[in-house]
Amino acid sequence: MSDARRLIQPRRRDENLGPHLAELPDELPAQTEAEVQLAAVGLWKRYHKGRVDIPVLRGVDLEVRRGEFVSIIGQSGSGKSTLLHLLGMLDVPDEGEIAFRGQRIDNLPMRKRDALRNHEFGMIFQFYHLLPELTALENVLSPLLIAESVLGYVRHRKQHVARATELLEMVGLGHRIKHRPGELSGGEMQRAAIARALASEPEVLLADEPTGNLDSSTGEEILRILRTLNGEHNLTIVMVTHDLAIAAQADRRLRLAGGQMELA
Ligand code: ADP
Ligand code: MG
């Protein structure tokens, strides 16, 4: 097994669990490929502007199988980020349900949602959202610090640093680990953000316009990394974008329009 592969192998459920995850609803059985990993049924989301109700999602259905790379294309304002936030449990739907590996997750108490997100979901964004005061290495370490108690983090710090360094090497940033975001190019910042998203060994990567702020050749490099993570490491990826050429590189393409999901 290559180092890179070991890095993002899903953990067995009984090892290395953070202090919170043991409290998740039930034991999750090992999941085979082609099983539905992430599902949304009838998602509605409205925002309120003054007294006006603006429905953004109007009954969105989605099924993502383990190891799939799905792209969702949609115009600006079509609700792509809203949908990803719901899938990543950063927000809750007004109606509908979301299930991860067959278990409903949208109605979990906040603490359990946080724990599940921290352990099973990685997220990357158009503007990277790196912490500007931290080096690339420290940015990649940050989710591990959040997931563990301070004491646990200190105890495992050596392993964490080794792992974060390997992840940065895997995305081609081994020579930039001490650089702060302000000293990195856009493509390098997105690579660092990808390494950070992988730090907790997630099963699913949610990518919100990951190439939206990059020139096309740099965007291609980011896509190449995502395809490698998906193809060689079986990471499930849901990517939203308004860019047809980028969306076309996924295995399956969907379109969000009029608040509903269509085939693209
Ligand atoms: P996309 O990511 O496809 O560009 P978004 O999901 O960000 O679209 O937004 C969809 C629509 O919802 C837009 O019209 C946006 O203005 C509106 N919207 C998003 N977030 C909020 C919010 N927190 N409050 C009010 N309106 C919002
Ligand atoms: Mg958006």
Image: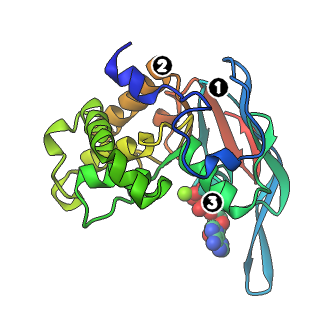
> Ligand 2 falls in which quarter?
bottom right
Looking at the image, the residue that sits furthest to the top is: 1
In the rendering, at what x and y percent does residue 18 appear? 54, 47
Identified by mark 3, the residue type is Leu
Q: Residue at x 21, y 51 (%)?
A: 185
- Which quadrant holds the N terminus? top left
Query: Disc 3 beta carbon < 8 A from ligand 1?
Result: no
Marks 2 and 1 sit apart, C-alpha to C-alpha, by 12 Å
Q: Residue at x 66, y 33 (%)?
A: 264
- Where is 232 relative to 57, above or below? above
Identified by mark 2, the residue type is Gly
Return the residue at label 2: 231
Q: Is residue 130 left or right of residue 43?
A: left
- Where is 162 relative to 147, above or below? above
Q: Residue at x 48, y 19 (%)?
A: 231
Return the residue at label 3: 90
Q: Secondary structure at mark 2?
A: helix
Marks 1 and 3 sit apart, C-alpha to C-alpha, by 21 Å
Query: If you read the primary sequence from the N terminus, does the residue marked by circle 3 or circle 2 appear first?
Result: 3
Marks 3 and 2 sit apart, C-alpha to C-alpha, by 27 Å
